[in-house]
Image (cartoon, grey):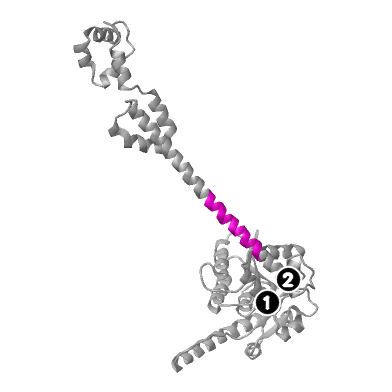
Amino acid sequence: MERDIYLYGIIKQGEKAAAATTARLIRESQNYDVLRLHINSPGGDVFAGLMLYDLMKSSKVPVDVYIEGLCASIASFIALAGRKIYIERSALMMIHAPICSVAGKADAIENAAVLLHKVEGLFEARYSERTGKTAEEVRGWLKGDNWFTAEEAKGAGLVDEITASSSASLRVSASLIKTLSSGELIKNYRAILSINNKILEKTMGNPNVYAVALGMPGESEESSVLKKISALAQEKDSLAAAVAAGKVKVTALEKTVAEFKTARVTALVDGAIAAKKITAQERNTYLALAEKDAENVEKILAKMQGVGRINAQINQPVGVSAADWDTLEKQGKLLSLKQSQPEVYAELYNTKFGV
């Protein structure tokens, strides 16, 4: 059983960022046979990338890497952790040394330089370990931005195989593109179609992977692709607005239902009090019961007799025994009945005990 995980967009820190989502999915997928990590990223936060690299390496389930579109900066380092690394024929890789911005006194700048050298040394070791290149060769890659076509990446040992984009994988990419925000879409797209001359030379003649993924001709103009991306972003925003409006309506409906239920329960209990089936002191108890199970409480109250009805039955002529002995006994009215209407009491007594 295999599972596809997608690391698309800029790699950032934060629990809602792509790096954290990817890490969570890897941790939750340890019952699979193989994980396929699809990378299309211009890079991002070094430490988020180091975390993913170590997580992939320690995973009990082998993780194969599929480079789609762009795998640059720290994304190329993450790819090194794959058991097997595949790259699409039109994709690119880019390697460079870690970068940071720092401001402050001399010691702060010196400390930042020490950190950069340490991370750079880590890069050298891992790239060398994966590719079999010497540390000196890898240091050459880390000077400036070094771009690799699929063929060059394979020749350098950065990837194992070159794959041709299948229509199925492009459909998956298109669906994922639709989930990104408009800002992420444009940043991702421009990362692939950078105006850097070195990249343009290497991508010349290759199909525009974003255009193909969006169902457009591979030779589409950048302006046309950006227009399509903007349309998708607007569509996504419209759907989000519709979902939000729907949630408001559902909340209002739930409130109406709750108010109706409360009104029905209140009317039921107050009606029972008016009919003298229960006392006012019992109101809160019956309200609580009816709130949990109004249907059964309604049935119980329907079977109960009001005090006025029983009194009417007591005042009926001798020979008519609609009220029973047990009901009057529970209400403590047998003594008053015996004193006020001894004939009715005697008839009830005879009926109850057969005397």
Q: Is residue 342 above or below residue 76?
A: above
Instruction: Left or right? Give the position of 126 relative to 155.
Output: left
Instruction: Left or right? Give the position of 52 relative to 219.
Output: left
| Quadrant (top left/top right/bottom left/bottom right) for the C terminus | top left
Q: Name the one closer to the observer, 306 or 175.
A: 306
Numbered circles on residues, count: 2
When asked about the image quadrant of residue 236, the answer is bottom right
Residue name at image x 63 percent, y 82 percent: 127
Label 2, secondary structure: give it.
helix
Camera sees residue 8: no
Tell me, for residue 225, which label it has, or none.
2
| Quadrant (top left/top right/bottom left/bottom right) for the N terminus | bottom right
> What amino acid does circle 1 point to?
Arg
Label 1, secondary structure: give it.
helix
N-terminal of the pair, mark 2 or mark 1, is: 1
Query: Callout 2: few (<14), some (14-19), or many (20+) C-alpha neighbours within 10 Å?
Result: many
Tell me, for residue 190, which label it has, or none.
1
Magenta highlight on residue 327 = no
Q: Is residue 276 above or below residue 345?
A: below
Residue name at image x 69 percent, y 77 percent: 192
Q: Is residue 60 above or below residue 340?
A: below
Q: Residue furthest bottom?
A: 106
Q: Locate residue 271, reporting x and y percent.
A: 37, 29
> What amino acid does circle 2 point to?
Val
Q: Locate residue 319, reporting x and y percent.
A: 31, 5
Q: Locate residue 114, reporting x and y percent.
A: 50, 90
Give the residues drawn in magenta, as a range: 233-249
